[in-house]
Each structure stands twice: as structure tokens, then as C-alpha cells.
Amino acid sequence: MLVASAVLPHAARSAPPAEAPRPVAMIRLEGAIDVPSRAFLDRALEMAERSRAGALLILLDTPGGLVAPMTDMTKAMLNASLPTIVYVYPAGAYAMSAGTFVTMAANVAVMHPATSIGAAHPVELFGAPSPEGEKGAKSTEVMARKIENAFSEQAKVIADRRGRNVAWAEKAVRQSITASAKQAVKLKVVDLLAEDVSDLLAKVDGRKVTLPGGQTVVLHTAGAKVEEIQPTPSESFLHVLADPNMLLILLALAGLGIMFELQNPGAILPGVVGGIALLLSLYCMAVIPVNYAGVGLIIFGMLLFLAEIKVQSHGILTVGGVISFVIGALMLTDVALTPMMRVSWQVIIVVTMLMLAFFLFVIGASVRAHLRKVQTGREGMLRQHGHALGDLKPVGEVMVEGERWRARAVEGEIAKGEEVEVVNEEGLTLFVRKRQ
């Protein structure tokens, strides 16, 4: 017993200190899932693997996005050589549509208690019924069903791979069902809830995850240092464009700039700004689900504003332009399956008021130009005032606008020095009368 008591303290003193947990790399994916999002995730995975991070933590808040980037992102996460953790965060965030696939593809899926997930039905790619009639409509319906089946199977495969609720994943695609964070944990859609990043790291510590090739890794995240990876300026800029509010602003800028250039050829700057805004709006329309009927109504509304400058409609065209523009803004994105992608009412009101103010300014300037008194030619001389340089009996000379003119009195004689008013002009002779 004495020997044991002597050896044990020595063994305790000679035990190596516990190894500090490896840092956890972290990125934030906010807004629509798009091409810049995919590029950001690919770069983050590469940097995390190169720096031998313990895991990649993805803070997710998305209403959905494009199919191709989402597919590439889930593929990259399923084949990542380090553990991936998706955290739907902060409070009020959601992982809808494409975000559901990204969340389920993570080794560990975590949600803040005040978040939601689901509604992963693919947005219809074909818009309005085909002009081919019933046959075309049936063809579109068949194609839509094929796409739904494909995404349903993909969701089931991802859920099965990560040991999650396969039946719920299928319903999220086919029936667009959603679940709150607590329901998602109860249904085994995600693994657990966490209040913040520190709470998450403490709760997932010691959890076993399986990497490609069957390798099992134990997470050591309690107290780990979090190293956030920032998006590049190009990734940030392109991602900002994937916003329906930005699309509305760009369309308004494009319309105003191009129409101003057409009205004032040679201004250059408005045309350049309008052209750039138009090209950027085309990128936006490729990234988010756009309802082209809404785009058409917005363009029609701006054309009505422009017509008000040319036609005196007593405000009817302006009212019609406002109504068309607002309805077009409300219909700009396809929100039937992605309701979070709608244009903000505040943005609609502000943009509409600015456009209306601009066109009222242009219309006001046009009206003032029409009402302005003519300053040159025959019309410019009418009603001008001057004085007689000599007696007009009835012919003589007058001084008008600082110039000496030959004049003829039309109403009796006019004495030298009397003020006169021009009533007509023929050639170089003014016809005048005494100023009333």
C-alpha cells in the first residue's frame, strides 16, 4: 500500500497535458442559395481542410435558392474530409427549400429554438401553360412530376445517409411541409437545439460522426477556438444581387437611366448607369425565381410614366403607371413556394415614390418649357416694350430690347419718347401702338 501511494502521485505528475481541441472554422450563409454561396462553401471547406480544423460550422439563414448550387453544396458536404455542422441561426432564421437539403447534408444539424425548416418543394421551372394547348400543359405537368420525384429521392438519400427522418424529408419535397426547431428535433430531422455558438460547441463535444470511407471521428469542440472565414468582395457583391428588393431597385434604375438618355441624347451618364443596372438585373433574374408577368407590369408602368410627358391625360397615365408598377413589384418573384423571397413593402413604397417624384419633376419641367414665353424670332418680339426715338407719323424709329428698329404706328400718331408695344413684325419693320 505504501508503494502504491508513492507511485501514483509520480504517475500523475508525469502524465502529459490534455491536447487542446483543434479550432473550428465557421462561415455564414445568409440569403438565397446561389452560385456565390456555392463558391464560398467550396473555398471554406478547402481552407478548413488545409488548416486541419476540427470541423466546419455553417451558420445558415436562407429562404431557398437555385437547384444547381444547392446540389453542388450538398455533394461537397457529403464528401467532405472533415466534419460539417449546420446551425440554423439566429433566432427568427429559417432553412427553407434549398436550405433544407443543405441542413440535412451536414454531419450534425443544429437549430436555434426560434427557427424553422422545410418547404423543399422545387419551384416550377416552366411558368405559364404551354401555348401548345392541352398537350403542352400535360407535357409540362409530366416534367414537373419528374422533377418532384427526382428531388424527393435526393432528399431521402441525404436523410438516410445522415440517419435522419426519411419520411419527413420526402414530405418536405412533395407536400412542402415545415417544422419548428422543437418539432424538427422530435421528428429527428435535426440532431439538437442550441442557444448560441458556444452552447452548440459544448453540446456536440464527444459526438461521433462518420466521414467518407467509413472513418469515424469524435468531435472535440468544447472550448475550441472559432475562426470565421469571410467571403471575398466578389462573393459578397454577387450575393447581394440575389435579393428581390435589389432586383426591383435595379429595374427602376435601368428604366429611369435608359429613358432619360433617350429623352436627352448625349447625357451619357444616365445611359451608362441604366445599361449597367439592366445587365445586373438580368443576373438577379437568373439567380432568384422571377415572375416575368411582374417584370412586364413594371416596364409597362414606366412606359405609362413616359407617355404622360408626351400626352396630356390629366393624370390618368400617371395613376395607371403607379398601379402597374406596384402590382408588378408585388408579383416580381414567385412566392407561391418560396414566400420569404417576396419584395419588401417598404422598398416598393420608397422606389415607387422616388420614380413618381422623378417623373413629376420631368413632367413639370416639360410643362414649364411649353409655357415659357418665346424669346426669339417673330413670336419673341410680340408684346415687347420700347420707346419712340422720334415722332411716328405714322413711320419712324423705335428702341426695343436695346436695338433700333424701323416702326409704323397702327393706331394714330405716337410722339417722341412715348412708350410703345410691339403688336406685329414684317421683315425689319415693327408695327407698334402706344403702351396701354
Image: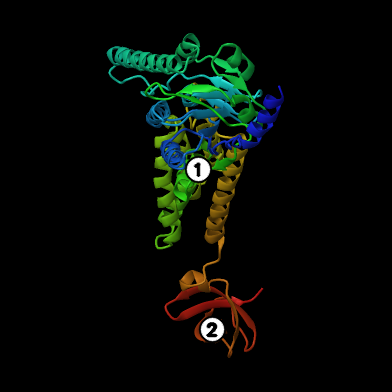
Residue 363 x, y percent position in the rendering: 54, 52
Q: Residue at x 53, y 14 (%)?
A: 177
To which quarter of the image does residue 1 belong?
top right
Q: How much space separates mark 2 and mark 1, taking CA atoms?
A: 78 Å
- Local SS, label 1: helix
- Tell whether label 1 touches label 2 (CB within 8 Å): no
Q: Nearer the viewer, residue 56 or 166?
A: 56
Question: Amino acid type of disc 2?
Answer: Pro
Query: What quarter of the picture does the C terminus occupy?
Result: bottom right
Which disc number belongs to residue 301? none
Q: Crowdedness of circle 2 by 10 Å Cα count: few (<14), some, many (20+)?
A: some
Residue 300 x, y percent position in the rendering: 45, 38
Q: How many marks?
A: 2
To which quarter of the image does residue 314 belong?
top right
On the picture, is 388 further left or further right than 305?
Answer: right
Question: Amino acid type of disc 1?
Answer: Val
Residue 429 x, y percent position in the rendering: 46, 80
Furthest residue toward top: 167
Tag 1 residue: 240
Tag 2 residue: 394
Indicate whether 268 appears above or below 347: below
On the picture, is 361 further left or further right than 133?
Answer: right
Residue 378 x, y percent position in the rendering: 47, 72
Q: Residue at x 51, y 83 (%)?
A: 407
Query: Could one spot residue 307 in this view of the protein?
Result: no
Q: Crowdedness of circle 1 by 10 Å Cα count: few (<14), some, many (20+)?
A: some
